[in-house]
Image (cartoon, helix red, strand yellow):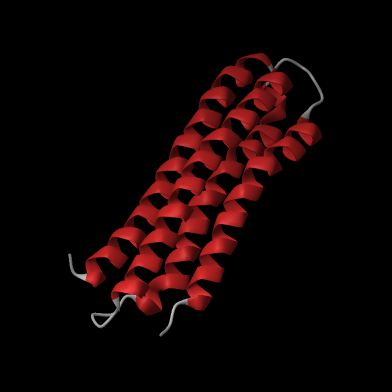
Amino acid sequence: MEPILLAYLGVALMVALTGVGSAYGVTICGNAVVGAMKKNPDALGSYIALSALPSSQGLYGFVGYFMLKSFLVITITPFAATAVFGAGLAMGLVGFFSAIRQAQVCANGIAAIGSGHNVFGATMVMAVFPELYAILGLLVLILIAGTIPA
């Protein structure tokens, strides 16, 4: 396999996995909102805020692309291509799973708010924990990109 293809595969996996994870996560939250609206339609603002949280992982994948795009040249070395692939795969997997798990936390909070419980703040705090791993994944990608020889 040509090194450039390996690098592009890593970037494609990163963008695709983080995007799919975010889309899946937002859908989990959206489904919870539909059910919660039947019980408590007045809390729509809280529902929307919690539903939007899993979308950030897709944005991290997009940022990762901009961090790695300068390496996507036909003369990329096998070492650099492997580093780009590894960084992209790591960010993609972490973003995918953290978006889904964050959505599950948010969906539970949405259901609880729909049932009349005052748990918006606690849900936001708990939803930060899966998000931190996506942020760490992006930071690792940035660190790897900083060590790849140009």
- Observer-nearest residue: 54 or 85? 85
5 in relation to 56, above or below = below
Q: Quadrant of residue 78?
A: bottom left
Assign the N terminus to one quadrant of the image. Answer: bottom left
> Horizontal placement of 136 versus 74: left or right?
right
> Horizontal placement of 77 versus 103: left or right?
left
Assign the C terminus to one quadrant of the image. Answer: bottom left
Q: Which residue is drawn at 44% across and 51% down?
A: 92
Which residue lies most toward the front here? 79
Q: Residue at x 73, y 38 (%)?
A: 124
Number of numbered markers = 0
Q: Quadrant of residue 87?
A: bottom left
> Can you give x and y, in whole percent of width and height, for residue 66 in the image?
45, 71
> Horizontal placement of 90 versus 35: left or right?
left
127 in relation to 89, above or below = above
> Can you give x and y, in whole percent of width and height, for residue 89 in the image?
40, 54
Q: Which residue is drawn at 25% across and 83% down?
A: 75
> Can you give x and y, in whole percent of width and height, for residue 6 in the image?
27, 64
Q: Which residue is drawn at 56% across and 42% down?
A: 54
> Horizontal placement of 124 versus 59: left or right?
right
Which residue lies most toward the left here? 1
- Observer-nearest residue: 125 or 39? 125
